[in-house]
Structures are given as structure tokens and as C-alpha cells.
Image (tube, grey):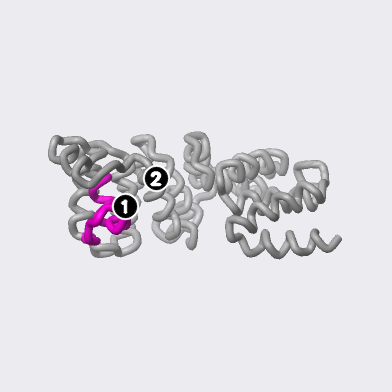
Amino acid sequence: MKRILLITVLLFASAYADITTFEGAKKACDGGNAEGCHNIGLMYDVVGEVVGVEQDLSKAFKLYTKSCDGGFALGCSCLGMMYYTDRGVKQDKFKAFKLFTKACDGGDAGGCYLLGRIYADGKVMEQSDFKAVKFFTKACDIGYASGCYELGTMYADGKGVRQDYSKASKLFTKACDGGDAEGCYFLGKMYADGKGVKQDYSKAKALFGKACDEENADGCKNYAILNKK
């Protein structure tokens, strides 16, 4: 569940590159541009300091709602996170689930990932490894690194799919290449243990180091161990 809370940062970061100026986003939203509404909502939510806008979760909520209603999938994911994490609105995880579904159906990889986490955890909807695999696969296919990591763990553990270390290693590789630190760590473990790949301590050390650089504590620990050999 820790990852589903931290995903807020990833959702915001994925959209931040598209933000230009506060005024530009406001004009776009006023003109009926759903993405513009999302971007200005994002400014009121978490990045206001960058553009001189004071945080206002109430305004962010209204703007995300307008963005989602206008068909911008990422707006639905951000709105869902407000319901899920009790940010600026009364917590309603079932409503969040519906918004993540709408986001995923609209092509937002983060929404698909969040649905996968919900089905894997089984705290909002009935637990289902099969459905978790379905949504992690969709997120990964769209290019969401954390979705690839989660899918890799499903194949490594044989949850919802037939256990396949080789496929798990490929998914961890994709996750690591996409910047997911845990993907790098688990791929390093596979090279260290010789599971799904040919045992290679040199590659394992490099991967642990990469995970460590991304502040993964287990990566740092294992890098130190191999560094002594």
C-alpha cells in the first residue's frame, strides 16, 4: 500500500513537463481545454511554489473534476488520488476506484497501475491476483515502469500467472530502464541468485548500485556486500 500512496508524486511528475505558465494554463482551461484545467489544478495542488500560486486544495479539486469531466484521463487519476488519500475532500476509496477505472479506460497508465494495486491489496475491492495482473500488464504496456515492476513480482511469485523467472527478469529490466529503483534491485537479486538469468555478480553489483542511487536501502545494502567480495 505504501507504493499506492507514493504514486501521487509520480502522477504529478508525469504531467509537470507539460506545464508552461499559470496564465497559459488558466486561459486554456477557461477555453474548455481539459488538460489545461488539469495543469492549473496541479499548480494549486502541489507545484504552486514554482509559479507563485498559493496551494488551494479546494480549487485543485474543482479543476481536476472539470478536467476529468472533460475527458482528460490524468485529471481523473489525480482526482481519484484526492479521494483515496483524503486530500481536500472526504475520503471515499470506492469513488477513487471508479475514477481510476475511468482514467485507465482513457489510456492513463497511472490509473491502470492504481487499479492493479487495489486488486492486489484487496482492501477496496475483492482481492484478485488475476485482475491485478491484467491492470499491471496494461500499465506496463503503456510504458509505466512501476507497472512493469509489479507485474515482474507477479511472475516471480507465480501470482495470477504461471511462475516464470525469465519473464520476471525481462519485466524488471524494463522497470529498471524506466527508472523504477525496486525494479533495479530485484533484477540485481536475480543476477546474484541466477534466477531467470545467468548468474553474474558484476551485473548484480551494478544494478544494486543503480537502485542505491535512487535511495533504495536494500540496493545499498547488497551493493556494500558485493563490493567486499
Check disc 2 and give the amino acid type.
Gly
Q: Is the magenta stretch mostly helix, strand or loop?
A: helix
Q: Can residue 82 be seen in this view?
A: no
Taking the spot 64% from the left edge, 58% from the top edge, the residue there is 212
Q: Position of residue 170 (x, y in %)?
A: 66, 39
Q: How crowded is mark 2: few (under 14 residues within 10 Å), some or many (20 or more)?
A: many
Q: Mark 1 points at which residue?
A: 80
Q: Which of marks 2 and 1 is nearer the N terminus?
A: 1
Which quadrant holds residue 35? top left
In this rendering, position of residue 26 left or right of residue 19: left
Q: Position of residue 64 (x, y in %)?
A: 24, 48
The residue depicted at 42 percent of the width and 45 percent of the height is 110
Kindly identify which numbered label has been placed on residue 2: none
Which residue carries the number 2 mark?
A: 111
Q: Do the residues labelled 2 and 1 touch (CB within 8 Å)?
A: yes
- Say which amino acid is labelled 1: Gly
Q: Magenta stretch: give its range.
A: 38-57
Of the pair 131 and 32, the residue shown nearer to us = 32
Task: Please check the rendered image and state whether residue 53 is part of the magenta-colored stretch, yes or no.
Answer: yes
The quarter of the picture where the C terminus appears is bottom right
Please indicate, yes or no, whether residue 48 appears anywhere in the rendered image.
yes
Up/down of 72 relative to 8, above or below: above
Q: How many labels does the image show?
A: 2
Q: Which residue is drawn at 80% across and 59% down?
A: 226
Q: Is mark 2 on a helix, strand or loop?
A: helix
The answer to whether 170 is drawn above or below residue 128 in the figure is above
Under circle 1, the secondary element is helix
